[in-house]
Amino acid sequence: MDKLIITAAITGNITLPVQTPYLPLTPQEIIDDAVQAANAGAASVHIHGRDPKTARPTIEPAVYREIAAGIKARSDVIVCVTTGGTADMTPAQRAQVVPALKPELATFNMGSINFSIHPIADRYKDEDYKFPWEKEFASGTKDFIFRNTFGDIEKLCQIMEENNSKPEFEVYDVGHLYNLNFLIRKNIIKLPIWLQFVTGILGGIGSALEDIMYLKQTADRLIGANNYTWSVIGAGYPAEFNVATLSMMMGGHVRVGMEDNIFVEKGVLCKSNADLVEKVVKIAKLMGREIATPDEARKILGLKGKDKVNY
Ligand code: KMH
Ligand code: ZN
């Protein structure tokens, strides 16, 4: 088995400030938290940017540049930037961070889903919210189609190739593996690939043991076990740690982080992403799985190296 690649998803664009006071929001908080997560054992940090004043998720390249450069100055961790954006952004706007930063890794969403966090809005009273955009942002996702059409995917493939950025393919459901299979057969996506199974999101597949097994078996059948490396996310608690443990047993890799889950134990908020990384490192050690350093992860994933980014 390869050493374990731990990704820490630092702030995301679906976790709301009302949910936890520990969510890193400003570029400096995101940098500090990402460096801490790397020091705790994360080989890769997945980055979303937020507006420095309003904390609302943004795709503004200057914010990403500040964050990525700030992390690079203090750590050799891999920086994986998002191309996910939010409901008010077009796929073209979401992709602009790739030519701007030429990152080693960037997320690549493999299909369109009704990506929804609207039940979160029901949990809070109006006076609980810290920012005026939060409530509508969450409730509006009831009708949000996270658009990733075949046309969008082809364009993003080209952008990623032009900038020598490796896609981290986000697979939210089994159909997305069929989308991948189609594009591999058409020679639009080249093997080997890096897959992130994103489970437990409302609108996509769940994070039961059977769901993870089915994703893995389907990927083996369609793509071929030797043609991909995979990692898994289970949104929420305890799914994050359950699927991480399962993945370690199956030879996969893991993602934790406040983008996906804010609890380190039942009812106990994590105070930083490092808390979540430390817990998964403990599980890995108990299971005898060694942790990959950033450079070991670069080798496993075939990345171009941090000297070839544009930040
Ligand atoms: N914007 C969300 C619906 C990613 O980082 O690429 C999903 C997302 C995933 O942003
Ligand atoms: Zn993300």
Image: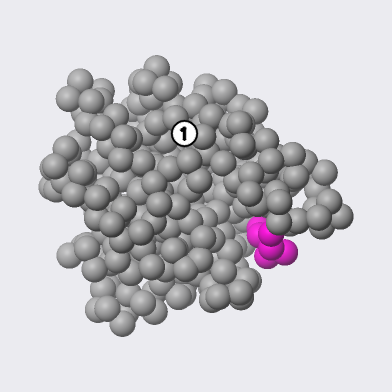
* Residue located at (62% from left, 55% from top): 30
Quarter where residue 254 is shown: bottom left
Which residues, given as a range, are shown in magenta?
19-26
Q: Is residue 292 above or below residue 281?
A: above
Question: Callout 1: helix, strand or loop?
Answer: loop
In the depicted view, which residue is nearer to us: 161 or 114?
114
Of the residues shown, which amino acid type is indicated by label 1?
Answer: Ile
In the depicted view, which residue is nearer to us: 45 or 17?
17
* Residue located at (51% from left, 60% from top): 236
- Magenta segment main secondary structure: loop
Give the number of marks.
1
Task: Give percent across and percent down for residue 200.
Answer: 45, 52
In the depicted view, which residue is nearer to us: 161 or 295?
161
Q: Left or right of 48: which side holds 129?
A: right
Quarter where residue 263 is shown: bottom right
Task: Give percent across and percent down for residue 309.
Answer: 44, 40
The residue most toward the top is 151
Mark 1: give few (<14), some (14-19) or many (20+) Cα within 10 Å. Answer: some
Task: Give percent across and percent down for residue 62.
Answer: 64, 36
Can you identify the residue that label 1 sits on?
113
Q: Is residue 225 above or below residue 176?
A: below
* Residue located at (71% from left, 51% from top): 122
Instruction: Check residue 3 for magenta coloring.
Output: no
Task: Give percent across and percent down for residue 257.
Answer: 51, 60
